[in-house]
Amino acid sequence: MPVDLSNEKYVVLSHDNAHATIYYYGATLTSWVVEGKERIFVSSKAILDGSKAIRGGIPLAFPHFGTVESSKLPQHGFARNSKWTFVGLTFENANESTAVFSLTPEGVPAELSELWPFGFKLFYTVSLLSSPARLRTSLRVVNTDSKEWEFTALLHTYFKVDDITKVGVSGLQSTTYFDKPTQTHITEESSRVTINSEVDRAYLKVRGEVLVDQLVTATVERHGIKFNEEGLVGLLKIRKSSSMSDVVVWNLWEEKAKAMADMGDEDYLRYICVEVGAVEPFIKLGPGESWEGFQIVEAIEE
Ligand code: BG6
């Protein structure tokens, strides 16, 4: 069965040997299992009752990423705190299973909706693709208002890793990033970004694909002598639409994990956020106009 609607909180989409779980709350995808292996991180203290944005998965940032001086909305806007509607299964064939969710102002909590009083419709499309196994998530933004408005948007993906200290992110070299902790713009020098302390960076206009890998140690034997050899193993390949060319890399690290109510003390070791989005500049959308951005994540087989 490509789609299971039996749970009142979420939809399960299946294709080949892959499954994805998407909550109606926030349209937050909380699980992507490929060949029995979970690729998405959800905090051990995540709140899943719809009273707070889910800490983990792929929360959606809309109508803005982060906090914005001109907006009274909370950080990352309201899409992740809203009740989305399951529209239906749009594709179901040998290559993919695709489910679509939508959001209009009626699904937004009233106290948030009144802070952003514009007509809009969002479509969030989740596809499981095969050969190789990929997850495609796409956000389409439609202005249903009679006035122009502006937005930024981001797919805030938390990937599950075994050990953050062994993880690297490639594809960011020579890109300028906004470093949130120091509030400065810096050009990335490293061909493989590693994480050994808090990292909170918005890489702007990333050209190609982004690769997440992991350093592994294996014991090899040569001439009867055993050696420990280190090597890099690819975990995920992330492609994105040209409309979503910014990439946020975030791990809050130990101290902040302890201070965050919905993050387990050790959880920072088990995730890396690589968040594809359009965070700068704001995109203007006129009445009746629409915009779309997407990511395609490939689960690299080990
Ligand atoms: C990241 C931001 O995208 O989201 C970080 O760059 C932020 O600055 C993080 O801390 C988590 O945000 P929130 O609102 O879910 O705690």
Image: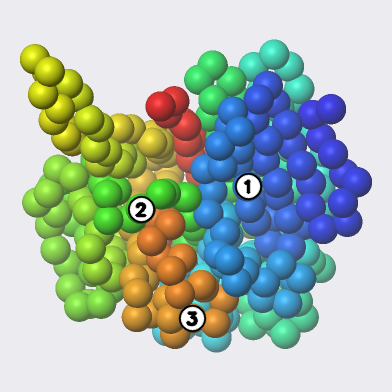
Q: Which residue is mark 2?
A: 163
Badge 1: how crowded within 10 Å, few (<14), some, or many (20+)?
many
Is residue 160 something that shows in the picture?
A: yes
Is 192 above or below relative to 118?
above
Residue at point 52% right, 73% down?
A: 263
Q: CA distance from mark 1 to mark 2?
A: 19 Å
Q: Are marks 3 and 2 in contact (CB under 8 Å)?
A: no
Q: Which secondary structure, mark 3?
A: loop
- Provide the secondary structure element on which disc 1 rests: strand
Marks 3/2: CA–CA distance: 20 Å
Element under label 2?
A: loop
| Residue 6, percent from left and from top | 91, 46
Q: Residue at x 70, y 26 (%)?
A: 15
Compare residues 274 and 260 and report the one nearer the observer.
260
**Which mark is nearer the camera, 3 or 2?**
2
* Quarter residue 286 falls in: bottom right
Q: Circle 1 sits on which residue?
A: 31
Report the amino acid beneath label 1: Ser
Q: Which residue is mark 3?
A: 260
Mark 3 C-beta to ligand 1 under 8 Å: yes
Q: Residue at x 41, y 49 (%)?
A: 162
Q: Which circle's residue, 3 or 2, is located before the other in the chain?
A: 2
- For badge 3, the amino acid type reads Met
Q: How many residues crowd around disc 2 within 10 Å: few (fewer than 14), some, or many (20 or more)?
A: some
Q: Residues within 10 Å of mark 3 (few under 14, many from 20)?
A: few
Q: Which mark is residue 202?
A: none
Q: Earlier in the sequence, mark 1 or mark 2?
A: 1
Image coords of residue 102 (percent x, y): 75, 51
